[in-house]
Image (cartoon, rainbow, N blue to C red):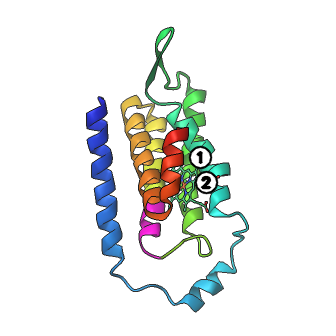
Amino acid sequence: MNASSLLSMFAKTISSLILAASLAACSAPDEPSQADETAALYNTTLTNKELMALIIEPASDILWDSGGWVLDASGYEELYPTTDAGWAYVRAQAAIVVEAGNMLALPGRAEDNDAWMIYSQGLSDAALRAMDAAAAQDEEEFFQAGAQLYSVCSACHQAYNPDIVNRFVESD
Ligand code: HEC
């Protein structure tokens, strides 16, 4: 797949996320007292920043490093796993990201009850797609799932932490 079709796919995913987020913005927020009560049921000691740096980023990096091709001094190198164990490993990393969507959505972590929840679910959805693709050892579908995942990270950072978007792109 070429760069421009990848870009237009990002754009499509982002605009549908934005649409979903603005629709959600119309619904009434939960009662704060109820949210506080629920928050007390979970251990949210880890900050969102720690979740990002210690759980979400490492697992996602393995997914991105396991899809597509790179051109280096020795020519094109395929990054996809080549063994059942290799696919099982990336599938497990995707599972971490699926659940990370829930971690972000917990009371005490969620920054609101609107767009934040849409992006958190978007993270789980993209990672579930990666899990299915890994189970099927479907390279093209796995690559698409990685692209979808990347667009969710970027969309949430754009909305909630524009500084991160720049850092994230630079360090990528
Ligand atoms: C639901 C919103 C949301 C999603 C989805 C999301 N992030 Fe983040 N991310 C944030 C916020 C907010 C911060 C800033 C946290 C802070 O500094 O307090 C952040 C910060 C980060 C940081 C910087 C951490 C640090 O040590 O400063 C990294 C790296 C990161 N995210 C990676 C990712 C990756 C990779 C994905 C997708 C696989 C992703 N994020 C998905 C909201 C999100």
Asked whether the beta carbons under mark 1 and mark 2 sit within 8 Å of each other, the answer is yes
User: Can residue 128 be seen?
Assistant: no
Q: Nearer the viewer, residue 142 or 69?
A: 69
The disc at residue 172 is none
- Three-letter amino acid code at disc 1? Glu
Q: Give above or below for 129 relative to 4.
A: below
Q: Residue 92: give x, y in percent of width and height.
A: 59, 42
Count of marks placed on residues: 2
* Residue drawn 58% across the image and 28% down it: 86
Respond yes or no on whether mark 2 lies under 8 Å from ligand 1. yes
User: Can residue 144 be seen?
Assistant: yes
- Three-letter amino acid code at disc 2? Met
User: Quick check: 66 left or right of 42?
Assistant: left
Q: Which picture quadrant has residue 16?
A: bottom left
Q: Residues within 10 Å of mark 2 (few under 14, many from 20)?
A: some
Q: Earlier in the sequence, mark 1 or mark 2?
A: 2
Q: Residues within 10 Å of mark 1 (few under 14, many from 20)?
A: some
Q: Which residue in the structure is indicated by mark 2? A: 52
Q: Residue 167: give x, y in percent of width and height.
A: 54, 47
- The prevailing secondary structure element of the residues shown in magenta is helix
Q: Which residue in the structure is indicated by mark 1? A: 57
Respond yes or no on whether mark 1 lies under 8 Å from ligand 1. yes
- In which quadrant of this rendering is ligand 1 seen? bottom right
Numbered disc 2: secondary structure: helix
* Residue drawn 60% across the image and 35% down it: 89
Magenta stretch bounds: 113-120
Q: Quadrant of the N terminus?
A: top left
Would residue 115 be counted in the magenta stretch? yes
Q: Residue 77: give x, y in percent of width and height.
A: 48, 16
